[in-house]
Every structure is written in structure tokens, then in C-alpha cells.
Amino acid sequence: MDAIASPVTLQGPTEREADLVYRTRLPVRIWHWVNAVTIFALLMSGATIFNAHPRLYWGKYGANYDQAWLVIGKRAQEGFLRLGGFEIETTGYLGLTPYSTKAIPPLFTIPNYYSLAEGRQWHFFFAWALVISLTLFVIYSIFSKHLSRDLALKPEERKLAHLWHDIKDHAHLRFPTGAAAKAYNPLQKIAYLGVIFVLIPLVVLTGMTMSPTLNAAFPWLLDIFGGRQSARSIHFLCAAGFCAFIFIHLLMVVLAGPFNELRSILTGWYRLPQPRKDSL
């Protein structure tokens, strides 16, 4: 049909066809969506578990009357969040809402009612899904050279001047165009490597540290993280890190062009954005 519509296509692809490239391989796309579902399920089931005792401590021990560094709760008809000596009112959002008196409302929990036993079942199931999917993805990334070819920072990208330039481009919403848009930019690489090799392993290890059964098998975990309560706090901060990553990731997708980005992660095909005519 293209050949009938335009004789130019007899000599080669049109300009728009030439701009369409295969950017995201199938294993990467599968892991992306499996990981997305897994992380959301872990965050929401983890919120149910957190609601059982919405206070965080540093050290080996923690109970209601110990000094907590983070508290989400209610006082009479007021919800509040206290971080160290700083406190803000959260009535209607956290601690006390029209639907719940729990720290985190049911809209953000699995199940959408308070059940510590069910929350743990959901959490443990998806924790295993996270471990298995990450292991398979890392094996694939090493043997397919996805890690060394696509994710590892190139020598010039490790320079502070290069990273600072990339930060300024993102701050001014200047995204790569042409052939440069096919590859991950340095900030993307750092974010993805941080999630794969820091955030996920840390959340898994701290989760293991909170299990009395696993403490018997791996007692050194308690020494590494300074006790079960410190591990719980780090686990919570990792969850906050996932939330921040998801927010920034979705924001960048919207700003860079949601249709094109979704097509890439669904089908693998991506249309290279062209520089604006008024750009220098």
C-alpha cells in the first residue's frame, strides 16, 4: 500500500519508517511488567503489615513506649505524621480518614481492609516473585550483554561534567533526539542500576532480617543491619525509594511522550524523536 501511495518508497523506507527502531527487547519488556505488578503488590501489602504497628525505630528493639523516629497515627479526631521532632496534621489522608483509622487508608492496601495475616500472605508471595524475576533478569542481562551494552555507564558518561550536563538537560525538559534517544541516558542508567543492584537486594535482605525463622539460619543479617527494628526501618525507606522512583519514572514518561514510550515497552518499537526546528 505504501508503494502505491508514494513512489519514493520504491527506493527505500519513508522518513517516518526510518525513524521507527526496535529499542526494547522482549525479555526486558516482560520483566518490566512483571516487576511493575510485583512492586505495586508489595507496596500495598506492605502497607497492611505496617498498619499493624505504624512506628519505626533504630536498633534491636521497638515497642509503643520506645522512642520512634517515625510515627503515623491519630489523636482524638486528628491524624498526624511525626518525623523525629517534626509533626504535621494528616487528617483525611493518613492516620484518620473517612474510611479508616489506620495509618495508611484501605485505598492503598492489599487487602483493602485490615488483615495482617492476609497482608503477609500477599507480601510473601510477591516477595518470591520479585526474587525469582530479578534472578532471571540478571542472568539474561549478563549473558545477552544487556547489562554491559545498555545499562553500564560508558567512560565519558562517568565524568561529573557529563552527568551535570544531563541533569541540566532534564531540568530544562530537554530530552535526547535522533539516534541518541535509542539508548538510555546516564541518569536512566544510574536509576535502573540502583534499583536492580541496590534497592531490590536491600529490600530482600532487610525483609529476611525481620523473619525470626531466617534469623536462625542467617544470624549474621542481624549484625549487618543492627537489629530487627533497624532492618524494618531500612525496609520502609526502601519502599519509599520505590515510590519516588515510580513517581519520577511515570513523570518522565509523560513528559517524553507517553504514546511513544508505551509503544516501546509494549511492542519494542520506538519512534526516534526529531530535534525541534527552533532548537540551536
Image (cartoon, rainbow, N blue to C red):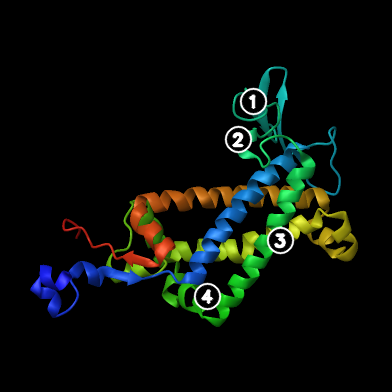
Compare residues 238 and 41 and report the one nearer the observer. 41
Q: Which residue appears at 70% of the width and 34% of the height?
A: 113
Q: Which residue is mark 4?
A: 147
State the residue position of label 3. 128
Q: Is residue 35 above or below residue 9?
A: above
Q: Quadrant of the C terminus?
A: bottom left
Which quadrant of the view contains residue 124? Answer: bottom right
Q: Which mark is residue 19?
A: none
Instruction: Choose between 45 and 243: the one closer to the eye.
Output: 45
Q: CA distance from mark 3 to mark 1?
A: 31 Å
Give the side of residue 225 with respect to residue 203, left or right.
Answer: right
The reply to whether dot 1 and dot 2 touch (C-beta < 8 Å) is yes
Q: Are marks 3 and 1 in contact (CB under 8 Å)?
A: no
Name the residue carrying label 2. 107
Q: Amino acid at mark 4?
A: Leu
| Residue under numbered circle 1 | 99
Mark 1: amino acid: Tyr
Task: Report if the CB atoms under discs 4 and 2 are less than 8 Å apart.
Answer: no
The kind of secondary structure element at disc 4 is helix
The quarter holding residue 16 reads bottom left
Mark 3: give few (<14), some (14-19) or many (20+) Cα within 10 Å.
few
